[in-house]
Image (cartoon, rainbow, N blue to C red):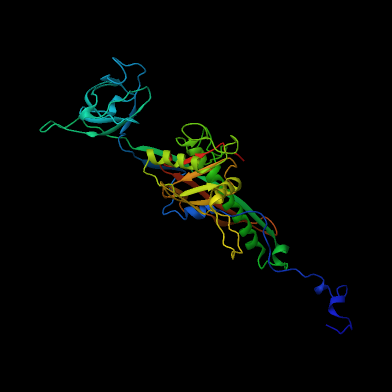
Amino acid sequence: MPFTGKATFTAAADLPELMEDVSDIIGIVSPFETPLLDRLGDPIKAATSTIHEWLEDELLPNTDQVNQSSFTPNATDATAITVDHGDRFRPGDQVRPDGIREVMLVTAVAGNVLTVVRRYGGTTGGALADNKKLFILGNAALEGDDRPSTRFSNRNRKRNYTQIFTSSVEVSGSMQAARTIGVADEVDFQKQDRLRELLRDLENCVINGVAPGATQQGSTTSRRTMNGIIPMIATNQFVPGTGGIPTGGGAGLNELDEDIINAALRTIWEQSSARIDTIVVGGVQKRRINALIGSSRRFQPSDVTFTDMVSAYESDFGLARIILSRWVPTDTLLMLDSSRIGVLPLAARSFHYKPLAATGDSEVGQLIGEYTLEMQNENAHGLIRGLAT
């Protein structure tokens, strides 16, 4: 470069190579984190068909409900009790009504009508009522008696569908040859961006995706989509103020609090062997969870850092890690047993780049991935919706 006599900071007009001062680092402002996928981790298996199925089993139930509004002679002394499911009982069962210390002994079962001995073993009697829950404590067999009738549960086949995630990459020959700031290879850069977008969309669909009502297996004219976590939870959908879930604070606005969380955790625990180890929320409900410790927060005079974050919630029903995800609806909190959830790729169809034949002066390719959600035992998970936002 010839000597010009000018200082370089004044030579911009004459030195084109010094006209720009641009960092070689390209910042991405759009959100692309996948905290739930990171929490679940890589699956230990792959799906082998576009219709992915798994089997679920459950033990014979040991609870039922009274299905009777009037009793003869009265609710405290009646020995003929009608229940919802008489096939759950056998002669010799000890039965305890919920909230009552009394134990009853079943002596006969005819359809849905039980003949019982009230106040068995000198236990304190109580009044029965319609829809009162009954706990079957266990059966007492007679010495030398024949084997009881065989009872068994049926395994259930559950399914979900794989969904194809795809995005195109096209870079002209000139763009690939040109020297660009912060990018050594334009094709690789485009691959990385499109892959971030597909991973973001995968997490969103894992949470919110819905399968079509018909032709779920897909066709050349019908797109195949998978059911996400929220649509697959059918049993444990809690709304504050209903179904035994208390109303939250905030002047009846159903603000999330510990009473709501613990009531939902207890209900899930009572009906399944699940251990809720993951709570997934958006920003609004995450702030509500952080506020749970507000009244008990203490600081020393020497403290210079203010911490206002709850990363785990431990209750009588287990320790749950709090996951912040942008894709959970604002009024919703998810309670998951992560050991029963997997995001599975179709065999040999995890995210990959497929070069395509170029029709001109460009490099063309396609990022492709095909995934499904396996969520075992939907009643081992739960969600709370209708929370104040």
Residue at point 49% right, 46% down? 372
Query: Camera-side residue: 73 or 94?
Result: 73
Give the quarter of the figure containing the N terminus: bottom right
Query: Camera-side residue: 65 or 366?
Result: 65
Q: In the shown orientation, is residue 363 left or right of residue 125?
A: right
**As drawn, 54 above or below 180:** above
**Place of residue 223 in the rendered image (x, y in percent of width and height, measured from the top left):** 56, 39
Residue at point 57% right, 62% down? 300
**Place of residue 79 in the rendered image (x, y in percent of width and height, measured from the top left):** 25, 20
Residue at point 87% right, 85% down? 3
Residue at point 55% right, 54% down? 297
**Place of residue 376 in the rendered image (x, y in percent of width and height, measured from the top left):** 41, 43
- The residue at the far top in this view is 73
Q: In the shown orientation, is residue 250 left or right of residue 319?
A: right
Q: Give the quarter of the image for residue 26.
A: bottom right
**What is the tally of numbered marks visible in this picture?**
0
Residue 227 in view here: no
Give the quarter of the figure containing the C terminus: top right
Q: In the shown orientation, is residue 166 left or right of residue 139?
A: right
**Place of residue 238 in the rendered image (x, y in percent of width and height, measured from the top left):** 49, 36
- The residue at the far right in this view is 5
